[in-house]
Image (spheres, rainbow, N blue to C red):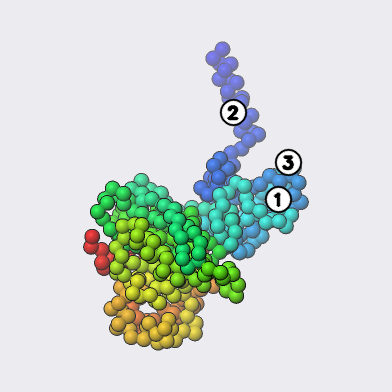
Amino acid sequence: MKKLICLGTILFAACLGASAQVPEGQPATSNVRGAEYPRIHPDLRVTFQIKAPSAQKVEVTPGGGANGLGKGPFEMQRSPDGTWSATVGPVQPGFHYYWLLVDGFPANDPSSETYFGWGRQSSGVEVPDAALDFYDAREVPHGDVRIHWYRSGTTGQTRRVYVYTPPGYDADTGRRYPVLYLQHGAGESERGWTAQGRANFILDNLIAAGKAEPMIVVMENGYAVKTGAVSGAGGRGNEAFGEVVIKDLIPEIDKSYRTRSDREHRAIAGLSMGGGQALMVGLGNLDKFASIGVFSGAGGRNLDVKTAFNGVFADAGAFNKRVPLLWIGCGTEDNLIYAGSRVLHEALEKAGIRHVWSEGPGLHDWQVWRKHLHEFAQCVFKSNAKR
């Protein structure tokens, strides 16, 4: 009887192997629970798959038409049972937006989590980077990401802000912390730096390693218009953001959290649109902010350093004494921003304005901005880290 059972098991396994091969690679960590696709292959090719028996044509479209996945759309192939598949790449490591075109209609992939990007809820795929793990969830003490609602007098609306509090915040009630105001890019939201950027894990890991000061990180929505104004009418819909930060957000955070509320312990940074906002708000309010970080968000092709930003750079000595950290970075493959960012860097260098310049391979994408935050967080608040 034992021999028959063993023989049956062997035959069953052989039949299973012949009819159901295990697909290559691993499901993306950005998939919804239990979804096998998108699937990441060892050589960083990515296979997308969806069942749509009634569809006539299905394509995969990278966010914006081109990103680290390549230039799309990528046409999917139909199997007899109505399953559509496409394999692309090898692709670049990192997080990439995408969506599907089903008979010309843009639709999110039901197998993927969704993220707010390109002004809409979009699918996203996380492609691992064998060389980097600083944004992974490690076995270290973790901070909390809190959702904080408050009323803005500037917009007349209730606004949502994401707030990272460092490990031990609730346990050590006598301690106060510096604050970093950290902004997302155009078409994204206050959720971006944690959902796409993994800012909380980046900070957790740096703090655990003693490489960054424990800090509160405030992530607001970069879009704001004044009460009675029409959102986007003649602008981008972000024209009142600076006023929200100064008049509403900073007082709310200082009231609600154990902050160090002097300018030396307050910084502002951001990516792309948020980097431009960091420059405008930070340089325009140096009584409130001492440090500024610009991630793929600086433009300076026609910049006159002496008159830019209301002449804040006119006296290099005074600026250098007042601003301990002006940090500017950009990916060298970023066709949107790199040239202008480098011009700004060179102009500041020529004028004697002390700043950090960081460049390296990369597109206009989250993998670059994760690296930027990782570098910036190790520099900010270092000169005034006393408890």
Q: Quadrant of the C terminus?
A: bottom left
Residue drawn at x 60%, y 75% is 234
What kind of element bears circle 3? Answer: loop
Q: Which mark is residue 13?
A: 2
Q: In front: 221, or 246?
A: 246
Residue at the location (72% across, 57% down)? 104
Between the C-alphas of marks 2 and 3, the distance is: 25 Å
Q: Position of residue 200 (x, y in %)?
A: 40, 54
Name the residue located 61 percent from the left edge and 37 percent from the top edge.
21
Q: CA distance from mark 3 to mark 1?
A: 12 Å
Q: Residues within 10 Å of mark 1 (few under 14, many from 20)?
A: some
Q: Earlier in the sequence, mark 2 or mark 3?
A: 2
Amino acid marked by disc 3: Asp
* Quarter of the rendering occupied by the N terminus: top right
The local secondary structure at tag 2 comes to: helix
CA gap, disc 1 to disc 2? Answer: 30 Å
Asked where in the image residue 254 lies, by quadrant, the reply is bottom left
Where is residue 214? Give x, y as percent: 31, 57
Instruction: Kindly identify which residue carries mark 3.
Output: 81
Q: Position of residue 270 (x, y in %)?
A: 44, 67
Residue at position x 33%, y 86% in the image: 315
Query: Label 1, on which residue?
Result: 77
Q: Earlier in the sequence, mark 1 or mark 2?
A: 2
Find residue 373 and name its label. Answer: none
